[in-house]
Image (spheres, rainbow, N blue to C red):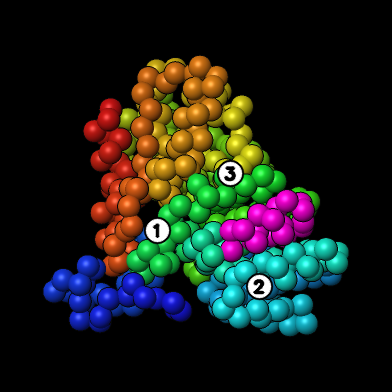
Amino acid sequence: MRRSKYIRPAHLGAGGSDKPRLTTSAMIASIAGAGQKTKPAPFGHALAKLAETNNRIVGLSADLAKYTDLHIFRDAHPDRFYQMGMAEQLLMMAAAGMAREGFQAWATTYAVFASRRAYDFICLAIAEEMLDVKIVCALPGLTTGYGPSHQATEDIAMFRGMPNLTIIDPCDAHEIEQAVPAMSAHKGPVYMRLLRGNVPCVLDDYGYRFELGKAKLIRDGRDTLIIASGLMTMRALEAAEALRKDGVEAAVLHVPTIKPLDEATILAECGKGGRLVVVAENHTVIGGLGEAVAATLMRSNVRPAAFRQIGLPDQFLEAGALPTLHDQYGLSTAAVTRAIKGWL
């Protein structure tokens, strides 16, 4: 990992206290559960495969090819891979230039660096010009234990306000594989939050197919509706199963496209009445999917029995072991289940 100024000394725990030592492997642990089916580097493999039939595709990295799975593309198509170094502004400007010359540029880095460091370059060089650039960023939300320098907890809030930019937050390897060709077919800039490494396989068990701009009901239930995106759809499905054992029927609506939001499907599901509506997201509760759904409901005067949010707090998060942080900040399956039980 680079630029890790928030990493604690090896003998100290999160916050610098004398807690048990946190190993590097624990801090960058996979989000997959024990024994869960996974696929390695689904984004890298999908892009490399797509590039076999589309010679317009080029890949660019800001010194993070290995950590965004773009190394798979690099090894398969070395003549179309560009290492831009530790300079995200340069990365985005180069991607914009290549798009102007007729290439489809896929730019990869960490979500914090694209959103915080290169926002103006994405806005004016890519989005305003409606260029065919796909921005794919690892470590979205709380998917690393390396503290605020690497945790992109507010990226969706930042990018939702940018005109022309499509935003995707996929759930699993199955969806990432399908999202890549869909992004390529879409003419214009796209920002995708990336789950990298060994990514869980969840949605294939439900016969799910990704469609850009579409939310889909994964399972139905009469007591509560969980609206989720990204890895929180996986957690919502696990929580729904745990709730079922206690006699609670929970529906799960997966919303992989944050912008443009599938308001029609959201309104239809929330308008069924009598259900607690819970929005779960791997993002701060400020400016993300939860507030987008709430605004949609208010504008259309749709009133569920109650509305609640599960998301990250409006604060800089601690460093530490990822499973511990997910439970601490309410993103674990157990935490989601507890929260919904309490509200019901």
Precedes in sequence: disc 2 or disc 1: 2
Q: Which mark is residue 161?
A: 3
For the residues labelled 2 and 1, the Cα–Cα distance comes to: 26 Å
Q: Sequence order check: which comes first, mark 1 or mark 3? A: 1
Residue 190 on image: x %, y %? 67, 53
Q: Position of residue 127 (x, y in %)?
A: 70, 52
Using the rendered view, name the quadrant where residue 258 is placed. Answer: top right
The amino acid type found where label 2 is placed reads: Leu
323 with respect to 287 (left or right): left
Q: Which amino acid is tagged 1? A: Leu
Q: For mark 1, what is the residue? A: 142
Instruction: Tell which residue pokes out farthest to the left in this image.
Output: 18
Please tell me which residue is depicted at 66% across the width and 54% down the height of the picture.
123
Q: Secondary structure at mark 2?
A: helix
Residue 55 located left or right of residue 261: right
Residue wearing tag 2: 90
Foreground of the two, 84 or 253: 84
Label 3 environment density (alpha carbons within 10 Å; few <14, some 14–19, many ≥20): few
Relative to 280, residue 111 above or below: below
Q: Secondary structure at mark 3?
A: loop
